[in-house]
Image: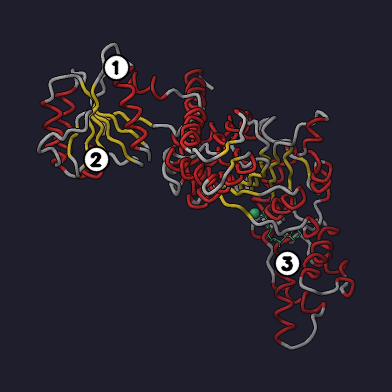
Amino acid sequence: MPPAEAAKKQQVAIDQSSSRNVVEELKRIIATKYPLVYVLTWEDQRLNNILKQVGEKAFSSPIKLYTWTLTDGLLDPAGNKIDNTEGPIAAINAIIKEKTTALFHLKDFHIHMNDAAVVRKLRDAYQALKNSYKTIFVSAPSIDIPNELAREIHLYDFPLPTISELKRLLGQMLQAQKNLKVELSDEEQQEFAKAALGMTLDEARVAFTKSFVGKSKLTIADLKIVVEEKSLMVRREGILEFVPIDFGIEEVGGLNNLKKWLETRTRFFTKEAEGFGITAPRGVLMTGVSGCGKSLCVKAISKYWKLPLMRLDMTRVFGGIGGNPEQAMQRALNTVEALAPVILWIDEIENALAGSREGDAGVTNRIFSSFLTWMQERQAMVFIAATANQIHMLPAEFLRKGRFDEIFFVDLPTEQERMDIFKVHLQKRGHDPSKFNLVNLAKGTNSFNGAEIEQCVVGGLFEAFNEKRPLHENDLYKMIGKMVPLATTMAETIKQIKRWADTRAVKAS
Ligand SMILES: Nc1ncnc2c1ncn2[C@@H]1O[C@H](COP(=O)(O)OP(=O)(O)O)[C@@H](O)[C@H]1O
Ligand SMILES: [Mg+2]
């Protein structure tokens, strides 16, 4: 990697850590004399407070902060209205005319930036303010900058509150609760703050309130309310979802190697193991032919290890479902950490990469590199279970040692495994497998994958049910005869996957 690129990656990692100092960053922006700054945030009030603080304290002489809204117009620092500044153009005119050094925070102003006259006025303002100590801040929850302004506007990504900000908020809130007995050590308060990471200050306020409202005392047991609140928030955003645990490992046919691996690690997530000096496994990547049970296995791990399973949908991250993809991803990872110990499931991870390439490559790379950094450095017990059908599409750094404990290759089932899979699916639907010649069925389904075997059982059942008689082996053979397995239609792709996996992955069966 060229040094410049490495430095950039490093920079991203630093930017996204909670050690960002927003006061310093805003101070630098003001000192740089950017006339127009577009701040990406949901939190315009928190931004306003911090701008005020920066204006008052960061420079040798204080700088006034004016705030504009469509309903009030421009308000001076004391909250006095400046006459006739409600309209967006009138507001900009007043800003251009202002003689002293000042900051101007325009709330919801991005909505007006689709208006040609406003765009023109902002470009005038840019010229007028270029050499002054006046800065206009426009805050908005998404990037929506007209092309005409792209070169005049400086974009600033305002981070979510840090642990210390959240802890301060909690402290203030608890102090105001006169009738609440707070039985939290400093460390436990830190835990509360940590559980709220990824939330805006307002969201954290709601979560904290819920944890003690109507109670006479607050203990560490109430932490779960904050965590619950966060999981609700996560669902609303539509990027992460809790997957119900309803699959047992006994419902997976074959894949004995993988099962053994899981079995030996069952007790690794306990305090006991930690005391013994064992570090919990960090992740597994399952790759291979589709329809052979990769997704199935992830669901089974959750039940097997008795850990909650959260699924992260990367295509939704890149699709902008949760807003700005980088922030959404960061929030999701923070959330997952707060829910630890937990299994994080990323299904068909290569799709996210492929899908996003069409979009902004810069954003994709940044998200991916910060994800890799997080994978490497996360402290919390988050076990990553990733699956990939087309593993050769994944970037090499994703597969480097240390990211995953093991990379498994899930191949088409062997004859023995096909027997197992028939058994699983017959049993699951209430039919006694011992009444069927599993050996012959397995022989007859050479190069079928698990999903196809399941399809034969399901189809055979339909047939028998329609004819109002018990399921017969011939019903299964009839289905087998009709099926064209994927392995035939996709022989080339499968060969490619196998070739890749031969040297790089461990066989799951
Ligand atoms: N090894 C297996 N044992 C039992 N059922 C299987 C197996 N492999 C596939 N199946 C069936 O096929 C369906 C699809 O499998 P899935 O796990 O989604 O495949 P993959 O993720 O590898 O593409 C499963 O829901 C399951 O019913
Ligand atoms: Mg799958």
Q: Position of residue 181 (x, y in %)?
A: 57, 38
Q: Is residue 272 left or right of residue 374?
A: right
Residues tagged 1 and 2 counted as in contact (Cβ below 8 A): no
Amino acid type at mark 1? Ala
Q: Earlier in the sequence, mark 1 or mark 2?
A: 1
Residue visible at 72% across and 41% down in the picture: 501
**x and y percentages locating residue 369 in the rendered image:** 54, 31
Q: Is residue 401 left or right of residue 207?
A: right
Nearer to us in this view, 457 or 218: 218
Residue that numbered label 1 is attached to? 31
* Nearer to the camera, 476 or 300: 300
Image location (x, y in percent) of residue 19 = 50, 24
**As drawn, is 132 to the left or to the right of 3?**
left
Assign a secondary structure to mark 2.
Answer: helix
| Viewer-side residue, 98 vs 452 | 98
The correct choice, above or below, for 60 with respect to 396 in the image is: above
Ligand 1 within 8 angstroms of badge 3 C-beta? yes
For residue 43, side relative to residue 9 (left or right): left
Label whose residue precedes the other's in the sequence (3 or 1): 1
Q: State the SS at label 3.
A: helix
Q: Amino acid at mark 2?
A: Phe
Label 2 belongs to which residue?
A: 109
Q: Quadrant of ligand 1?
A: bottom right
Q: CA distance from mark 3 to mark 1?
A: 66 Å
Which sits earlier in the primary sequence, circle 2 or circle 3?
Answer: 2
